[in-house]
Image (spheres, rainbow, N blue to C red):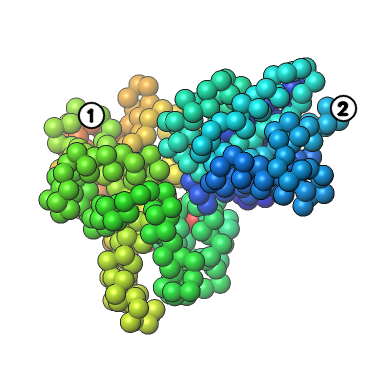
Amino acid sequence: MLPGRETELKALSGYYDRVGSQVMVIYGQKGVGKTTMIEDFLEDKSYLYYEAVSCSTRQQMFYLGKHLNDMGFSLPEYPDFEEVFNLFSTDTIKKQVLVIDEFHNFCKTDTLFFDALLKYLTDEKEKRSIFVILTSSAMGWVENTMAAKLGDFSKVITDHLKVKELSYRDFTVNFPGFSSVDSIGAYAVLGGVPGLWQYFNDEFSLRENIESFILQSNEKLFDYGQQYVAEELRETSVYNTILAALAEGKNKLNDLYRHTGFSRAKISVYLKNLIQLEIVEKVSSMETEGKENAQKGIYRISHAYVHFYYRFLFPYQNKLSVLEADEFYEEYIEPDFRQYTADYFVKVCRQFLARENAARRLPFEYTRMGQWIGKTGNIDFLMEDEEKNRLAGICSWEKDMLTYADYEWLLFTQKQAKIHADFMILFSAARFDQALHIEAKKNPRLALLTADQLKNN
């Protein structure tokens, strides 16, 4: 079983155990582990599984019939819906499961399949005991279009489960051989998408993994970033331009407008599409009294591998074809990789704090977590409870050593945000100077943690 999906599997088992038929929609980005999770769930159950493709309903039923006949059933070349649904026995004790993977492809031209499934589930309802699992990687379609498209069938959907990326801690369980530095660096490249994890090997260093499994033209990850975008979106030249600009640090609408030459309205539409696919996110500061000192309207690439690709590979494709992997790494990745990884170290620190908060190991039980992005400095995480007790801090990845001056800068930034933090935590990639250790010993409101401590927790 893939570590990190225990909660989702428990939810699936709960719906499976309910009396009568249930319909569950499971969705999430490609590679996030939906299929693996469902395979784990189906291990001891009676089920039919079919992955839908993009085609007409008649062609779909032809493929479905062929798939089921290959499994040993006896169906016509072009089965009708009733013939497929009647494969589910009504006299079995154990509930049976029907899985339609990428089910949005059954709705490309019409909704005949779902109209028939609705009729099957509701006719003689007391005789039906089937668990229908519908999965999709078309996140924007599920969240914004599905209900209207499916009509009355939407009313029989029991629940929706969004499968999100796995955490850094789950990553370290799968890659125990990486050092803490390589582990966080690898997580900054692959993110929490287990479908991409299979291409890395922790018997090698992070650099060796990048050179061997990304910078080789015959490897899957070589152009995966661009392929991922192209599969989801049209007008890829526009999206490539916007993503490349974001990867270069042009993260405000005006920056994108000046760089791309596209109209602000056009950029906004394309950003909205990228946000729906969770390729890009709009970053905002937690609201404080110092809102006039905060930056607004900031966009970032949120899909780690897409970010890595457009930051380090897309701009230098002409060099990829002429340089050896180690030469390309040294010239175009190594100089800026530490800076690139800094944002992902912040993400790892926030995940750690969220776990500590859930386990009630922080000074208060915080109900809100965010960040504060100032015009002159940032607070990487800001947490508060209902009584406005606050915990704040910074996460330093680029520096070899976090110093007392960095602590003073955090105090200054709090003044800019017009807040007072009751507790502070400083996270460092490696170590702290002596002055900070002394301060932490005499100040019970201050804690110091390193990347090694995060890997082991």
Can residue 328 be seen from the camera position used here? yes
* Label 1 Cα neighbours within 10 Å, binned few <14 / some 14-19 / many ≥20: some
Tag 1–tag 2 contact (CB < 8 Å): no
Q: Is residue 124 left or right of residue 197?
A: right
Disc 1/disc 2 C-alpha distance (Å): 61 Å
State whether residue 125 is above or below residue 276. above
- Secondary structure type for disc 1: loop
Q: Position of residue 329 (x, y in %)?
A: 35, 75
What is the count of numbered marks? 2
Q: Which residue: 40% across, 43% down? A: 277
* Label 2 Cα neighbours within 10 Å, binned few <14 / some 14-19 / many ≥20: few
Q: Quadrant of residue 392?
A: top left
State whether residue 256 is above or below residue 207. above
Identify the residue position indicated by label 2 in the image: 91
**Nearer the camera: disc 1 or disc 2:** 2
Q: Residue 269 versus residue 328: which sits nearer the camera?
A: 269
Mark 1 or mark 2: whose residue is earlier in sequence: 2
Q: Residue 431 versus residue 60: which sits nearer the camera?
A: 60
Can residue 424 be seen from the camera position used here? no
Q: Amino acid at mark 2?
A: Asp
Q: Position of residue 264 (x, y in %)?
A: 17, 41
Q: Amino acid at mark 1?
A: Thr
- Secondary structure type for disc 2: loop
Q: Which residue: 29% across, 43% down? A: 271
State whether residue 195 is above or below residue 122. below
Q: Quadrant of residue 297?
A: top left
Q: Is residue 61 left or right of residue 109?
A: right
Marker disc for residue 288? 1
